[in-house]
Amino acid sequence: MPPYEISVQCSDCGHEHPVLIKIHLDDGPDHKQSVAESFHGRSMPPQVMALKNIRALCRRTGKSFYLENDDKVFLVPPSAFKRNSGNG
């Protein structure tokens, strides 16, 4: 079961912020994709539904907000964050 990083598009500043949590999914996407796209037409696993109870922090404004909009919450697979964490 691979771990997926969670990120969110901020409604205050419009930028994407990491939420700094991971969830494990058997049938998650193979590329970065919104929760809405990933589970369109099928039920969401409990760990994905639990994301709605989590608050994220906008690093630009300092305001916090809940991860309520499935179109703005993204699942980032391990292949995507390994590629971005290399030689920098």
Image (cartoon, helix red, strand yellow):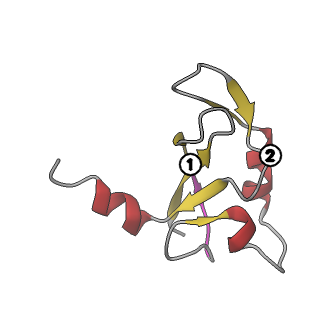
Q: Position of residue 25 (x, y in %)?
A: 62, 67
Q: Nearer the viewer, residue 6 or 50?
A: 6
Find the residue positioned furthest to the bottom.
41
| Residue 44 sits in quarter | bottom right
Where does the magenta region start and end?
22-26
Residue 19: mark: none
Q: Position of residue 85 (x, y in %)?
A: 27, 52
Real-space Cα separation, disc 1 to disc 2, in angstroms: 13 Å
Residue at disc 2, secondary structure: loop
Q: Is residue 22 left or right of residue 49?
A: left
The location of residue 47, given as percent across then percent down, is: 73, 55
Three-letter amino acid code at the position of disc 1: Ser
Residue drawn at point x = 79 percent, y = 39 percent = 53
Residue pointed to by mark 2: 68
Question: Which residue appears at 53% of the width and 40% of the height?
Answer: 17
Q: Nearer the viewer, residue 49 or 61?
A: 61
Whether residue 23 is in magenta: the answer is yes
Inspect the image, locate mark 2, and give the three-letter code of the amino acid beneath it. Glu
Residue 53, compared with residue 72, is above or below; it is: above
Name the element at disc 1.
strand
Q: Looking at the image, which residue is at 66% across and 32% down?
A: 12
Instruction: Tell me if residue 71 is in the magenta stretch.
Output: no
Q: Residues within 10 Å of mark 1 (few under 14, many from 20)?
A: many
Q: Which residue is mark 1?
A: 7
